Image (cartoon, helix red, strand yellow):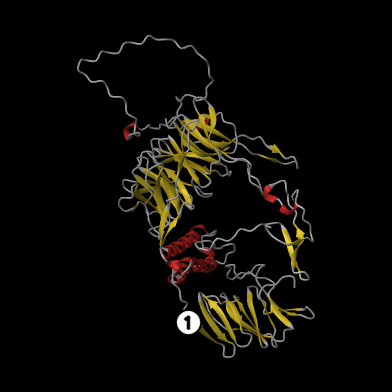
């Protein structure tokens, strides 16, 4: 018997009923593939096998009572209890549930079979063929349902920065927060266990924060005051779909966002009207950027050749126009704040690296930075340079100030562009794709391009490997357009957000957040504390929220729209009735697993959540197998696994230089 799952002995102990496979924890209903369990009777003397009641679906939980084999099978669509008479080979269905599966059946090997069915226990009397539900009261103090305050600094999903970098914006565990850079306390702006709030973005004038929330039962765009005053207000009621990539126009009048269907929408805040402006037919649409005046959107869209081009949508005429060639992949658009260039990343550097092992090649480090001049009169940023003589001009005297006039006050720092002062981006679309320049930055694995006054920001990452991490950490670079020089702003960056005025950047390195000035030398990094971020968790509300969101995500993302022909709404309604009985996250995972398995699809699993388990002691991994020597009562080394000791990730500790350990050695003590 090389492999075995569940089984049971015959009353005389000479035979065994068993299944070679075990997959009972997998949420697969009506499965007919290679892991569908079959049952066999094995003669323990001859080792001969006899199949019992085979079908194309599952037979599991075998039990041997008298001259009959009892088991559970979903051959009729739902897991029910069956029996097979060993004398006649007659198989009979004993329970007839059409919704709740019979699971984890076991017997006393004489008369009674007990099993679980959708959270309830039942017993089956094999002598009378009667089923009886068991009512059990389990004392519970309800700790897993008790509200509590939970730190969320380790669960930050997204972040942004206020327009001038005074406060940071965080999304963690379904709530939206702002936190001070130096002085003050964090603010939880949404305070809800019954909704998943995410995708937050700070408005350019600083007064409002937009975010995506399913508080209404579907993802919609909401607005909330940045100080937390007043109630959040919904702004949309567009589609039944997951929403993504919420971005403000620089004038604060509109918000762009996309949905799971790949459609890009623009919301006008004043009248809450929404218009669909683009449709990405090959996946999600999250790569787009507003022009400085808020009059245009640069959008990355896929071509039929599976490369991407940039398009520009204009508010004035609601037209979408191609901006870059179909022949090269273009992405990550970034508008010049002066409204003269649209910068972007493009894979145009083809310098294949030849393998030193096989005669193969890989095209790596092929992404460069490019720009298109938006008008014909725009000057070339990188025209040939020439040292020329400056002609001194005698300055004219300033006009005399009438007596009694006050001295003009010194200019005060601009607190931000007013709408009337904002740059108007004018575009000449004819010949636009041909007005391309290359920014003098070496091609590499570049990403996340953004443009601020006089500079470009972008990331440089190491190459991707199979089986190991790149030795090169992602770094944030800054390129000076005037000096034509690049410098490293921050090393080891996991993400960054630039303030709307372009003066500050919030960077994430691991779990640490820092604020850095956007200038070539960067200056000192100011740490941004997230330790005080916390949510007031109400588990019962959170359980309902998780259930609803899982149901919606399967509706939105299941690989076929017809949900395998099942009524997904009816399935959701049926399992939602169990929520009042959920007392712990493990209960919720069970309910979710049962609901999802109704779709009859594999690799759809549920895991994780707040189990509040005590921290387990860490153990060493010596890379060896041990066996007990019964004669002396000691463990000895049975095998030592080989590794690749030149690389930390694959080393075998007991084979390293200086370690004198061999197969057959006894383990007498650990840590002395």
Q: Is residue 558 left or right of residue 623?
A: left
Q: Quadrant of the N terminus?
A: bottom right
Query: Residue 563's spot in the image, x, y percent?
Result: 52, 63
Quarter-of-image position of residue 192: bottom left
Residue drawn at the location 43% of the way across and 34% of the way down: 503
Vertical position of residue 388 compared to residue 68: above or below: above
Q: Is residue 513 left or right of residue 408?
A: right
Query: Residue 460's spot in the image, x, y percent?
Result: 57, 38
The answer to which of 62 and 595 lies nearer the viewer is: 62
Vertical position of residue 312 compared to residue 135: above or below: above
- Work out whether residue 265 can be spotted: no
Vertical position of residue 663 compared to residue 511: above or below: below
The answer to which of 432 and 102 lies nearer the viewer is: 102
Crowdedness near tag 1: few (<14), some (14–19) or many (≥20) residues, C-alpha within 10 Å: few
Query: Residue 470's spot in the image, x, y percent?
Result: 63, 43
Q: Quadrant of the C terminus?
A: bottom right
Q: Residue furthest left?
A: 404
The answer to which of 531 and 167 lies nearer the viewer is: 531
Vertical position of residue 614 compared to residue 109: above or below: above
The answer to which of 173 and 365 lies nearer the viewer is: 173
Q: Residue furthest front?
A: 672
Quarter-of-image position of residue 240: bottom left
Residue drawn at the location 61% of the way across and 83% of the way down: 107
Query: Residue 280's spot in the image, x, y percent?
Result: 50, 47
Q: Which residue is label 1 attached to?
A: 135
Q: How many marks?
A: 1
Kind of element beneath mark 1: loop
- Work out whether residue 616 can be spotted: yes
């Amino acid at each position: 018997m090389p492999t075995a799952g569940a089984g049971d002995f015959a009353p005389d102990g000479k035979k065994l009923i068993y299944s070679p496979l075990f997959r009972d924890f997998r949420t697969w209903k009506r499965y007919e593939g290679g892991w569908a369990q079959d049952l066999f009777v094995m003669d323990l003397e001859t080792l001969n096998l006899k199949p019992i009641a085979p079908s194309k679906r599952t037979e599991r939980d075998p039990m041997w009572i008298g001259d009959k084999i009892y088991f559970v099978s979903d051959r009729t669509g739902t897991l029910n209890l069956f029996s097979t008479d060993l004398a006649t080979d007659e198989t009979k269905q004993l329970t007839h549930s059409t919704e709740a599966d019979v699971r984890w059946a076991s017997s006393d090997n004489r008369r009674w079979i007990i099993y679980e069915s959708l959270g309830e226990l039942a017993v089956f009397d094999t002598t009378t063929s009667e089923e009886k539900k068991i009512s059990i009261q389990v004392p519970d103090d309800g700790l897993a349902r008790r509200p509590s305050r939970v730190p969320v600094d380790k669960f930050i999903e997204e972040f942004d920065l206020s327009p001038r970098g005074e406060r940071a914006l965080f999304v963690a565990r379904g709530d939206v927060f702002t936190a001070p850079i130096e002085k003050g306390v964090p603010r939880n702006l949404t305070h809800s266990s019954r909704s998943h709030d995410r995708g937050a973005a700070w408005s350019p004038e600083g007064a409002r924060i937009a975010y995506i929330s399913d508080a209404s039962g579907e993802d919609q765009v909401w607005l909330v005051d940045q100080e937390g005053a007043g109630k959040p207000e919904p702004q949309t009621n567009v589609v039944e779909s997951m929403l993504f990539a919420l971005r403000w126009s620089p004038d604060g009048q509109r918000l762009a966002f996309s949905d799971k269907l790949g459609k890009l929408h623009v919301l006008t805040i004043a009248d809450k009207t929404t218009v669909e402006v683009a449709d990405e037919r090959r996946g999600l649409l999250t790569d787009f950027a507003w022009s400085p005046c808020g009059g245009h959107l640069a959008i990355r869209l896929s071509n039929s050749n599976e490369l991407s081009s940039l398009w520009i949508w204009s508010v004035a005429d609601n037209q979408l126009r191609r901006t870059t060639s179909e022949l090269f992949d273009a992405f990550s658009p970034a508008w010049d704040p002066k409204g003269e260039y649209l910068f972007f990343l493009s894979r145009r550097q083809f310098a294949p690296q030849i393998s030193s092992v096989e005669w193969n090649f890989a095209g790596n480090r092929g992404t460069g930075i490019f720009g298109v001049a938006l008008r014909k009169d725009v000057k070339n940023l990188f025209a040939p340079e020439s040292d020329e003589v400056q002609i001194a001009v005698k300055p004219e005297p300033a006009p005399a100030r009438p007596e009694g006039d006050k001295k003009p006050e010194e200019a005060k720092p601009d607190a931000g562009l007013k709408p009337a002062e904002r740059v108007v981006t004018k575009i000449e679309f004819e010949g636009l794709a041909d007005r391309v320049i290359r920014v003098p930055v070496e091609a590499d694995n570049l990403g996340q391009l953004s443009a601020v006054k006089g500079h470009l920001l972008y990331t440089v990452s190491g190459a991707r490997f199979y089986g190991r991490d790149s030795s090169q950490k992602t770094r944030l670079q800054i390129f000076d357009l005037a000096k034509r020089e690049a410098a490293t702003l921050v090393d080891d960056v996991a993400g960054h957000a630039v303030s709307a005025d372009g003066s500050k950047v919030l960077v994430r390195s691991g779990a640490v957040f820092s604020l850095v000035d956007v200038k070539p030398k960067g200056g000192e990094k100011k740490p941004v504390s997230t330790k005080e971020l916390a949510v007031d968790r109400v588990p019962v509300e959170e359980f309902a929220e998780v259930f609803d969101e899982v149901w919606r995500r399967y509706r939105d993302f299941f690989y076929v729209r017809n949900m395998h022909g099942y009524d997904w709404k009816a399935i959701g309604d049926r399992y939602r009735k169990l929520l009042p009985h959920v007392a712990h996250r493990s209960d919720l995972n069970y309910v979710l697993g049962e609901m999802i398995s109704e779709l009859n699809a594999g690799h759809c699993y549920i895991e994780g959540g707040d189990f509040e388990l005590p921290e387990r002691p860490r153990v060493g991994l010596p890379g060896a197998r041990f066996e007990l020597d019964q004669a002396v009562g000691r463990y000895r080394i049975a095998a030592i696994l080989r590794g690749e000791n030149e690389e930390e990730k694959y080393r075998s500790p007991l084979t390293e230089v200086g370690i004198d350990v061999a197969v057959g050695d006894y383990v007498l003590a650990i840590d002395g």
